[in-house]
């Protein structure tokens, strides 16, 4: 995970209409709706756009005309210096004086023919290097203000339930396999994952305590492996379902039906998916094969689940 960084505000810009360049102003005032008098203010996730001055300067140098790009031409609200915006991830935080921003989106589709820079050179920097945020706490921002970047870990807990593995009678393989899948998945995405694994016996109270501790500490995802069958010690789905604020039956039904066509015993799994607070919990079977099958489907929805739970509309 990247470290905290401190940079500065080079310029602040606003525009009255969307899809147009922004113009520098002496200061901007932010509230929970975004930036006052800016076209992008509103109850949505792209209230504030940020771009690094270093990106603009690099883009200017590559322009065939040699023209210098002016502040606001990429429609950025805040132009920064000294911050590596390419390492930012959704849910990271920025602090500028009393203002607090939460990163909600990395880049966006260029307006194309509606973008003055794109019409001029056929390229734009915002899709890859622009950052979008929403206001957590309002205030005033002026050029020269210090900007502190605070990365936020995406906490994930992997819990294996097994009486025998917890006693050391055999090595847990499903938990590490699941952690490896998660590392591979997030390695190509802009998240700062923090994965912790553990092994506990098939005990309801221990599982309940582990899940509660994860939820209380802001864990985004809890994955359990084991205990989803119909044996007398298979208690995982029962505990998760009892604790759930909401269940997500469709995704597990889909996985069971997909793989159950070839192996009917898959249909005996009682795997469940649920939401507890802002934490998504997935109870998976305990074999490495099952973990691979389930995660090949679950990873398709994980980012969308995160955005939904944090009320970030990506459309």
Image: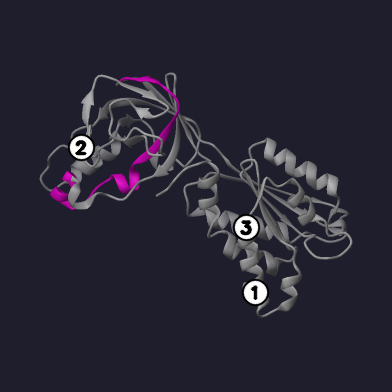
x and y percentages locating residue 60 in the rendered image: 19, 41
User: Residue 257 falls in which quadrant of the image?
Assistant: bottom right
Few, some or many residues within 10 Å of mark 2 (<14, 14–19, 20+): many
Residue 139 versus residue 238 in the image, above or below: above
SS label for mark 1: helix
Q: Quarter of the image holding residue 116? A: top left
The residue mark sitting in front, 3 or 1, is 1
Does the magenta segment cover residue 261?
no
Q: Does residue 293 show up?
A: no
Image vertical order of residue 59 relative to residue 100, above or below: below
Q: Residue at x 65, y 63 (%)?
A: 252
Residue linked to disc 3: 180
- Give me the disc on residue 96: none
Q: Give the distance between the C-alpha atoms of the residues marked 3 and 1, in whole angstroms.
A: 22 Å
Would you name the residue on which mark 1 appears? Answer: 259
**Chain part drawn in magenta:** 116-142
User: At x 29% / y 40%, what residue is drawn?
Assistant: 55
Q: Is residue 139 left or right of residue 51?
A: right
- Percent across and percent down for residue 223 are 68, 53
Write down the residue under mark 2.
21
Residue appearing at x 58%, y 65% in the figure:
296
Is 130 a magenta residue?
Answer: yes
Please tell me whether mark 2 sits on a helix, a strand or a loop. Answer: loop
């Amino acid at each position: 995970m990247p470290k905290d960084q401190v940079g500065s505000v080079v310029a602040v810009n606003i525009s009255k209409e969307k899809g147009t360049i922004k113009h520098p102003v002496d200061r901007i005032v932010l509230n929970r709706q975004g930036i006052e008098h800016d076209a992008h203010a509103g109850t949505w996730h792209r209230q504030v756009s940020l771009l690094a001055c270093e990106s603009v300067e690099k883009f200017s140098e590559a322009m065939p005309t040699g023209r210098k790009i002016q502040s606001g031409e990429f429609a950025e609200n805040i132009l920064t210096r000294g911050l590596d915006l390419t390492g930012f991830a959704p849910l990271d935080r920025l602090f500028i004086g009393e203002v607090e921003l939460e990163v909600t989106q990395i880049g966006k589709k260029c307006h194309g023919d509606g973008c003055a820079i794109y019409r001029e050179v056929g390229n734009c920097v915002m899709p890859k290097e622009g950052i979008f945020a929403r206001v957590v706490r309002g205030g005033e921002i002026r050029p020269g203000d210090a900007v502190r970047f605070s990365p936020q870990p995406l906490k994930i807990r992997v819990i294996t339930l097994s009486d025998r593995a917890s006693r050391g009678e055999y090595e847990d393989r499903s938990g590490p396999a699941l952690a490896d899948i998660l590392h591979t998945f997030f390695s190509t995405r802009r998240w700062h994952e923090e994965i912790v694994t553990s092994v506990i016996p098939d005990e309801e109270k221990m599982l309940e305590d582990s899940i509660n501790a994860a939820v209380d500490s802001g864990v985004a995802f809890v994955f359990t492996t084991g205990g989803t069958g119909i044996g007398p010690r298979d208690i995982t789905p029962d505990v998760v379902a009892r604790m759930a604020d909401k269940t997500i039956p469709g995704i597990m039904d889909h996985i069971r039906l997909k793989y159950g066509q070839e192996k009917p015993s898959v249909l005996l799994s009682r795997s469940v998916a649920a939401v507890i607070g802002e934490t998504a919990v997935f109870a998976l079977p305990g074999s490495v094969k099952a973990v691979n099958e389930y995660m090949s489907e679950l990873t398709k929805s994980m980012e969308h689940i995160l955005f939904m739970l944090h009320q970030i509309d990506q459309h």
